[in-house]
Image (cartoon, rainbow, N blue to C red):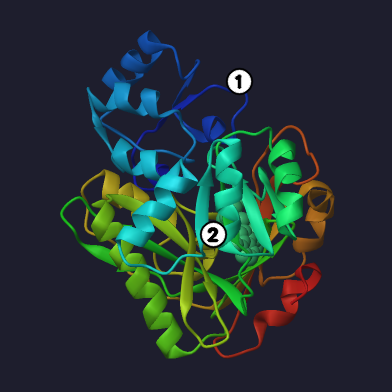
Amino acid sequence: MAAARMGYRTHVFTDHPHTPAGEVAVEVTVASFSDRVALERFADAVQVITYEFENVPLAAARVVAERVAVRPDPNVLAIAQDRLAEKDFLSRAALAVAPYQGIETPEELSRAVEVGFPAVLKTRREGYDGKGQVRVETERDLPNAWQRLGTVPSVLERWIDFEREISVIIARSEDGEEAAYEPTENQHADGILRASIVPALISPATADAAVSAARKVVRELQCAGVLAVEMFVLADGSVVVNEIAPRPHNSGHWTIDAAETSQFEQQVRVCCGLPLGSVNRLHDAVMRNLIGADVDTWNRYLGDGRDRLHLYGKKVSRPGRKMGHVTRLFPFGSNPRAFGGDAGA
Ligand SMILES: Nc1ncnc2c1ncn2[C@@H]1O[C@H](COP(=O)(O)OP(=O)(O)O)[C@@H](O)[C@H]1O
Ligand SMILES: [Mg+2]
């Protein structure tokens, strides 16, 4: 939709017959990500390709990257798809992360206990919205937890006793121009983002540390595109990086209605080689996700002029599925936190 507003025509490649993006695109290809012919035909039909989520099979991204510009580069996907590679990358970049250990074999279970408890065990691949992870209270519970995840390659990480969660959405262009939005405060329940609030309740020093961490991530990755860095803020105000997502991110959806340029427009600008837009914020804002049955309350958001309702048009609602969101706008300096509501704000 951001591309269309700027006069660009989009072509969506998807392996699902009904995909929300496909319904607002000019062309849609429905094919398997392993269908090389379909991928090549798609690549030849477009001028630049980007992703909507980071679990696009790497091999598919590499096939199209042989024929057309892909932003960000598939090498960025390779890191973001694998929690162990991601943690190793962050550590090498000297960014603080939770103590962690990779687990692939039963022998590695005993070594992993060094991270300390409570901890959380996460599958290395394909986790999102809290899926593919279990909390582990003590060393004794670890073998069981690994069984529950199907003994697939995983990462054990120490549970961080954070004061709050924040994220920084940053855009970086092909030639290295950067634009970082101010940190967003995020409230999760059961591993799923419920609400994002701007401004975040953090000190200027914490905000600086968070933005510096995000800049470091995109520079080290040489990432062209929009990228989100999720972080934990500790009681002393320092930040620990949780994970990265090389794409427009749910915690940046407030930028659609409350910033001078949305994160989606930034992605279009990077893809099309345009200068980045202003990241200035126009309002205080709270973005609330409509998850599963929440979407049935959508008409509650039609009568209040402060609310901006977004429904994704997904055909089926399931518990835990993100069906839409609503951003409520507030004047600067008002206290928007109360609208966090169910999220426990
Ligand atoms: N090490 C941790 N310590 C404390 N909370 C955590 C930790 N790891 C994950 N969480 C909680 O679970 C949420 C989802 O985990 P995350 O690693 O971001 O996976 P996903 O890919 O599902 O978003 C986090 O936003 C946070 O609330
Ligand atoms: Mg996350």
| Spot occupied by residue 97 in the image (x, y as percentages of width and height) | 46, 65
Q: Is residue 170 above or below residue 129?
A: below
Disc number at residue 305? none
Question: Badge 1 local density, few (<14 within 10 Å), some, or many (20+)?
Answer: few
- Quarter of the image with the C terminus in it: bottom right
- Residue topped by disc 2: 253
- Residue topped by disc 1: 17
| Spot occupied by residue 60 in the image (x, y as percentages of width and height) | 38, 23
Q: Nearer the viewer, residue 142 or 163?
A: 142
Quarter holding residue 35: top left
Quarter holding residue 127: top right
Q: Residue at x 37, y 82 (%)?
A: 208
Task: Judge left or right: residue 209 versus residue 275.
Answer: right
> In this view of the protein, can residue 326 be seen by the observer?
no
Q: Are marks 2 and 1 in contact (CB under 8 Å)?
A: no
Q: Residue at x 70, y 49 (%)?
A: 142
Task: Judge left or right: residue 219 versus residue 245.
Answer: left
Label 2 vs label 1: CA separation? 25 Å
Decide which of tag 2 and tag 1 comes sooner along the chain. Answer: 1
| Spot occupied by residue 271 in the image (x, y as percentages of width and height) | 28, 44
Q: Residue at x 32, y 36 (%)?
A: 74
**Mark 2: amino acid:** His
**Mark 1: amino acid:** Pro
Give the secondary structure at mark 2. Answer: loop
Q: Nearer the viewer, residue 5 or 93?
A: 93
Q: Is residue 300 above or below residue 222?
A: below
Residue at the extreme top: 37
Quarter, ligand 2: bottom right
Give the secondary structure at mark 1. Answer: loop
